[in-house]
Amino acid sequence: MNNLRRPLSPAMWSRALLMWGILAIGALLLGATALWMGTFIQGNIEDELEAQQISFPAEDNLTDAERAIDGMTDHAGEQLSTGDGAKVYSEYISLHMTEAAEAAGYPGATYATLGGVQRQLRADVQAAQDSGDEQALADAEEELATVNGLRNTMLTGSNLRGNLLSAYGWGNVGRGVLFLGIGILVLAVVFALLFAFEWRRGHLPETEEQAARDVSSGRVQPTT
């Protein structure tokens, strides 16, 4: 520990100052860049979401199932503008897609699974036309129209959910970049403090008078 308080040689002192100075400046630039990138990502997400003009329903209008969505009541009545809000709204859409499938008589159906149902119903329509069974034809056409509408709903909902979840993911990226920038700036402060320490105590080359005092006090041995 005593060696840490001894003056450095001019060459070593210069190198120490240069090292801490470069690290401080580099960390400052990198941290500032990360903060700018994180802020840009978050701001871009907010602008894109606000442009969609999507608003959460008022809390009084929420059903019990909608209230059960994590974060739904926190955002009730607000305009969608954040990545976290986008995730909540994607769950809201998912709930309504599930309810629409159940109401149509196809619980658990998705856009992909309804494709097979469509093909079967088209075949039923063709078979009814070929047989001349008007009642069977009417029933098949009605059911096909229901499935067509449900599948269109699933397509629209899935696309919107995908966009919202993408916004949520990029929002997390932007937040992570912001935190990274803050951490790097903290390191820049540490490096700057070490630079200041070396500048004030790190330790300036000793003068002849200091060397003489060190020899006379016995802290160092005279060189021969």
Image (spheres, rainbow, N blue to C red):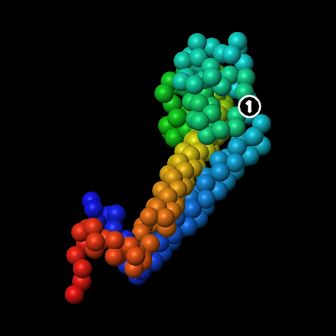
Query: Residue lying farthest front?
Result: 216
199 w.r.t. 123: above or below? below
Q: Residue at x 49, y 58 (%)?
A: 193
- Residue drawn at x 63%, y 14% is 63
Numbered marks: total: 1
Q: Residues within 10 Å of mark 1 (few under 14, many from 20)?
A: some
Rendering coords of residue 72 (x, y %): 61, 23
Q: In which quadrant of the rendered view does residue 88 lie?
A: top right
**Residue in front for this viewpoint, 143 or 163:** 163
Picture layout, residue 161 above or below residue 16: above
> Is residue 204 toward the left or the right of residue 94 in the image?
left
Q: In this image, 197 relative to 82: left or right? A: left
Name the one closer to the observer, 103 or 34. 34
| Residue nearest the observer in this picture, 157 or 163 | 163
Q: Quadrant of the N terminus?
A: bottom left
Quarter containing the C terminus: bottom left
As rendered, which of 157 and 82 lies closer to the eye?
82
Residue 216: give x, y in percent of width and height.
28, 72
What residue sits right under mark 1 in the picture? Answer: 79
- Amino acid type of disc 1? Gln
Q: Is residue 6 left or right of residue 218?
A: right
Does any portion of residue 162 appear in the rendered image? no
The residue shown at (49%, 64%) is 200
- Residue 11 seen in render: yes
- Residue in the image at 48% along x and 75% along y: 18
Pinpoint residue 219: horizontal percent, then vertical percent: 26, 68
**Residue 29 to residue 69: above or below:** below
Q: Circle 1 — which element?
A: loop
User: Which residue is farthest bottom?
Assistant: 224
* Residue 158, percent from left and from top: 59, 39
